[in-house]
Amino acid sequence: MRDERPGRGRRRKKKGPKTRLTRRGRILAWTGGVLAALVLGVAGAGFWMYRHLDGNITSTDLEHRLGDDRPDNLSPGSKNILVVGSDSRAGANAKYGKGLETMQSDTLMVVHLAADRKWATVMSLPRDSYVRIPSCERGDGKKSAPHSFKINESFAIGGSKGDIAGAAACTIKTVEANTGLRMDHFMSVDFQGFKGMVNALGGIEVCPKEPIHDKKAHLDMAAGCQTVKDEKALGYVRTRYSVGDGSDLGRIGRQQEFMRALAEKAQKKLTSPDDLYDFLDETTKSLTTDKDLAGLKPLYDLANEVKGIPKDRLTFLTVPNYPRQADVPSDRANVVWQYPQAAELFDKLAHDKEVDKKRLKAASKKPIPTRSVRVQVLNGTGVSGRAAEVAKDLRALGFTVTTTGNAPKRVGRTTVSYPERLRRPAQVLASRLPDPATRGGEGGVVPGAVTLTVGPDYEGLR
């Protein structure tokens, strides 16, 4: 494995057959191509080829950067892999953004592999997700202050001086803090490496239904089926504002479809040793992983674990969300995660339970904006000021706090109580607490509000 220094020269790529964009041949999103190719090629690779490809992969040591305040591993044997599509503005990537001197994450996914390796879920986190970002180490040795912003800013904070380890560490801390899922591994694929992977396969065919003209993505495409490579392939997976509703959610769908097609082609078309080498060379040069996953052997072992998963049990989904404008009318740029659906999704993965995508989608059809949940906060601890502290936490998440006060008596456990007609708003509130008691059919003193009685077990909101 090499250290974190610029890569080596590139070999000329040979042209290969094209493939049509399809839903078949599903494998792990951004990492699908490399895993599929490794299954095909590593076992028969010569020693020189193996050593060269193994040396291409950049590794980074993250353990000492993550601290001790991390989620517990609730499902030993399962694996959570954080996958980032890196939007670095360094080197050849500089033309994709003016005034951006930090590293950026363009795509963010959590790949959950079940302990029995019989199913897997690829969960996309929209990069415009408005979340809490914990304090992180910057590249200059200073620490950032905890705050709320787009989730992809975490990559930029840690990578403010081009340090991939810092970018990865801050992103992991942010994802863990907001999902409660402990990340076991990290992978990053950069823009230029992605382009090289596509070129080594001879391009991928896409079929846009309407022309795409996007100056930011450097893309000018006619409607209809066509094979894309080089800058067009890069632009196609990056384009956002000129297609559909212009949201990051639409882009996530295109990226997932594109990578499924890339993975399928890697599986079916890489029969030539030269083509296989070119693809593996480009792929491994684009990869940065944690130290435990770095190298062909760990990736090959991972590929062997993945390849037996049935296609119908590999699920791609996006964290349920809605426009933040519903909570903050002036914010038209971000989304917030939808509760209680997001919490239920995270809890299922944390406990290694397979997600029913159709059921999740149905439950997410009518989101309840956090702002619409009215809460009265009562202090049941006997400790002065607790209701005001918790009210501040709730307002930071967007809840509408109506009143604060003292409970009639002390309680042993934090409790959410509500009249039956406010069951759904109460579920939104309860899902942001670690393990509250809930009491339906009990109204508070404030009409139309859910009551949160704070107990001594309160440790903050999630």
Image (tube, grey):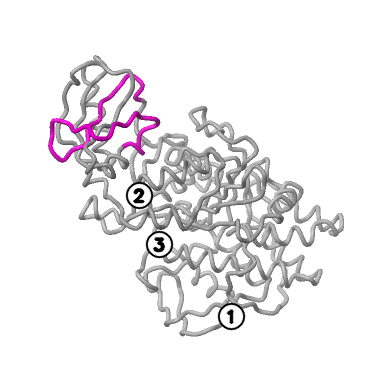
Amino acid under label 3?
A: Asp
State the image coordinates of residue 212 (x, y, percent, origin top left): 42, 79
Residue sitting at x 43%, y 43%: 344
State the image coordinates of residue 342 (x, y, percent, origin top left): 41, 47
Amino acid under label 1?
A: Thr
Disc number for residue 343:
none
User: Could you tell me if the residues under marks 1 and 3 are in contact, i.e. CB atoms within 8 Å?
Assistant: no
Q: Is residue 340 visible?
A: yes
Amino acid under label 2?
A: Gln
Q: Identify residue for label 3.
A: 248
How far separated are the C-alphas under marks 1 and 3? 23 Å
SS class of the residue under badge 2? loop
User: Could you tell me if the residues under marks 2 and 3 are in contact, i.e. CB atoms within 8 Å?
Assistant: no
> In this picture, which residue range is highlighted in magenta?
430-458
Residue 370 or 256: which is nearer the viewer? 370
Residue sitting at x 47%, y 79%: 208
Residue 296 or 420: which is nearer the viewer? 420
